Structures are given as C-alpha cells and as structure tokens.
Amino acid sequence: MKKSYRKTITTFFAGIFVLASLVSAQDNEPKGNVVSMSYYNIKYDMIDEYMEYLEENKQLWDKVDEILSVRVLRHWWAGNWNVVIIRDWKSLASMETGLEQVTKLTKEKYPDKE
C-alpha cells in the first residue's frame, strides 16, 4: 500500500512539472496580425457596380492607419458568396478603433445612407 501511494504522488508531481513546462513554453510564440474576412453575396448583374463602389471606398480605407492591408477577392461560380474582403489589423484593439474610423469616414462621404 505504501509503495503505490508513493508512486501515485510521484506520478502526480511529475505530471504537474510536465504541464508547467508546457505552459511556460507557449509564451514564446510570436504575436501575429488579426485578419477579418467579410463575405458578400452580390447579384451577378450588379457585381461591376459593387466593385466600383469598393474601389471608391478603398480610398477611405487608405486613410485609416490601423488597416495594414486590404484585399478584395471575387469568383464567378455558384455559391452563397461571391465577394470576399480581407483586412489585416495589428491587434483587436486597432481593429475596433479602425472600424470606428471607417464608419465615421463612410458617414461623412455618404451622409444620406444609414
């Protein structure tokens, strides 16, 4: 009985030591950027107009310093979406402030739209 008790305690502390070393090893990972992806389903006869609208809005996105890069992708085959907007941000906090700035600039450019 005494040997199994010691073995259990030794195994328990060895497990704690291994878990502690694994958790401390996770802190050394490099921090990356935050990526947001927006999917849109645009009617095929309106896609050229929408792409022109996005090109105009790209000038607004360039004014926002928190946006690191913006990519617009589209495809022509059937599905639930056909336009994807991918934005890179430095962090979640910069994403929140950047989206507020984009909303403010959009309201200034299009005051009649809500």
Image (spheres, rainbow, N blue to C red):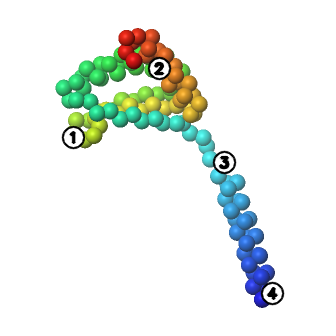
Badge 1 marks a residue whose secondary structure is loop
**Residue beneath disc 4:** 2
Badge 4 marks a residue whose secondary structure is helix
Image label count: 4
**Residue beneath disc 3:** 28
Q: Amino acid at mark 1?
A: Ala
- Quadrant where the N terminus sits is bottom right
Please provide percent x and percent y for residue 69.
Answer: 46, 28
Say the numbered circle drawn on residue 103.
Answer: 2
**Residue beneath disc 1:** 78
Say the numbered circle drawn on residue 68.
Answer: none
Q: Is residue 67 left or right of residue 9?
A: left
Q: Earlier in the sequence, mark 4 or mark 2?
A: 4
* 10 Å crowding of disc 1: few (<14), some (14-19), many (20+): few
Foreground tag (2 vs 3): 2
| Residue at left offset 65%, top offset 52% | 26
Q: Earlier in the sequence, mark 2 or mark 3?
A: 3
Question: Which of the 4 image quarters holds residue 49?
Answer: top left
Q: Amino acid at mark 2?
A: Thr
Question: How far is mark 2 from mark 3, CA to CA?
Answer: 36 Å
Q: Earlier in the sequence, mark 4 or mark 3?
A: 4
* 10 Å crowding of disc 2: few (<14), some (14-19), many (20+): few
User: Looking at the image, which is closer to me, 91 or 29?
Assistant: 91
